Image: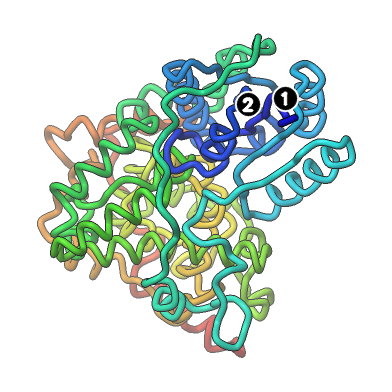
Amino acid sequence: MADASPILLWFRRDLRLADHPALAAAAETGRPIVPVFIHDQAVEGHGAAARWRLGRGVAAFAAALEDKGSTLVLRRGEALQTLRGLVRETGAGAVWWTRLYDSDARKRDEAVKAGLKDDGLDARSFAGHLLFEPWTVETRTGGFYKVYTPMWKAVRGRDPGTAAAAPSRLSRPESFPESDALDDWRMAAPMNRGAAVVAPHLVVGEAAARDRLDTFIDDKIADYDEARDIPAIDGTSGLSENLALGEIGPRTCWEAGWRALDAGAAGAETFLKELVWREFAYHLVHHTPRLTTGNWREEWDAFPWNEDETRPEVLAWKQGRTGMEFVDAAMREMHVTGRMHNRGRMIVASYLTKHLMTHWRIGLRWFEEHLIDWDPASNAMGWQWSAGSGPDATPYFRVFNPETQVDKFDRDGEYRRRWIAEGQGSPPRTALDYFEAIPRCWGLGPGDGYPDPVVSAKDGRRRALDAYSDRDF
């Protein structure tokens, strides 16, 4: 007889119904499905903004499941023990989930799979977080790609498979096990007063993510190649927020990008390349887990970066008060919206690691604390790329000049005025919101004078190049 026992479907960073291989496979069996989300040590370790945004995503996903006749069961605890408890309560014969690739997630999932298999259960992981599994993309000589462009060329014409539609209904068990109340987890607590400021900028859930993709394809992708570099323009897809939590699947985005390219949209190929840049980061994390914790290029271990977060210039960087307007505008954008334009991310990372000679890990942790689109692979890849210590990095001797970057990407000052209140007679709400989002203990207000540079563009560049000249790279 066919197995009719329930399937526990363990959701993590895959909070969607469509383009979900594990869910589609479970639905095809006709067996009862028990959707589960576990607040485990991995969730507890998230930064404030990332954890809060995850909680909002879980709430939206729970509502989407209710529309399909199902219920998301919430539990808090160590993953393996929590799943074992749910197996006992439900009589489930299988536990399925979507793979993750960073080192901490892999260690947890390997222990879960081994433990459940020892219990005689069908413990199974599925693809779905990426377009291509990291072990399926290799160079001609074998091994993984360490440079992005050859990887892009290798996968550009590859078919990742078709994104499956959402199931129309999900089979229910006779009864669902008891669930925690999401509010009891207090996932917004670490945000303090910043949650109220950032909340209007969120786009939460699968339906909203799909609307965001459709709007981008219809209205923005034609100009994406150029508009994506201008931070004052709403010229990007914004989908990093949703991809980070799997509220939209990568194959859904890939298929939309290809349709736009076939229709002649000028910026479509650049959009597809950005999806593969995300893939590149995850492939590197899978093959070289140290990317998220240490210098990918090990010769950088001896580089004399400062690792003291208490220095005044590091605090000024965190506050968005370095005296470099592009840097400060970008940092304040992150405080207010939980996001930062990609051009800004490159500028602030270069300024911290090169002008201020500060270790990229300090910046990586600060971003993890404040980004609603935090992603372990993309965050680490971006920081190491900017610092020069990572794979396919910008040449280590290239130091972004925040003053010349202004001339190129914010010549009329619109972006800076949007986020920096000091010196404006009637600053916009966005600039004033910064003072509502930041910690009160900083003691900052819009009437403060704008600071002089903590390190000038010229002096910072010279200091960085002097340090590079003393090293053997």
Q: Residues within 10 Å of mark 2 (few under 14, many from 20)?
A: some
The C terminus lies in quadrant: bottom right
Q: Position of residue 161 (x, y in %)?
A: 44, 57
Q: Position of residue 147 (x, y in %)?
A: 49, 78
Q: Position of residue 397 (x, y in %)?
A: 44, 82
Looking at this view, is 158 or 150 the one in front? 158
Is 59 placed left or right of 333 in the picture?
right
Q: Position of residue 430 (x, y in %)?
A: 24, 34
Please tell me whether residue 160 is drawn above or below residue 16 in the rendered image.
below
Q: Which residue is mark 2?
A: 31
At horizontal 36% and vertical 26% (from top left) the residue drawn is: 199
The N terminus lies in quadrant: top right
At horizontal 32% and vertical 63% (from top left) the residue drawn is: 272
Q: Amino acid at mark 2?
A: Arg
| Mark 2 in CB contact with mark 1 (< 8 angstroms) | yes
The secondary element bearing badge 2 is classed as loop
Question: Any mark on residue 5, and which?
Answer: 1
Is 374 placed left or right of 458 in the picture?
right
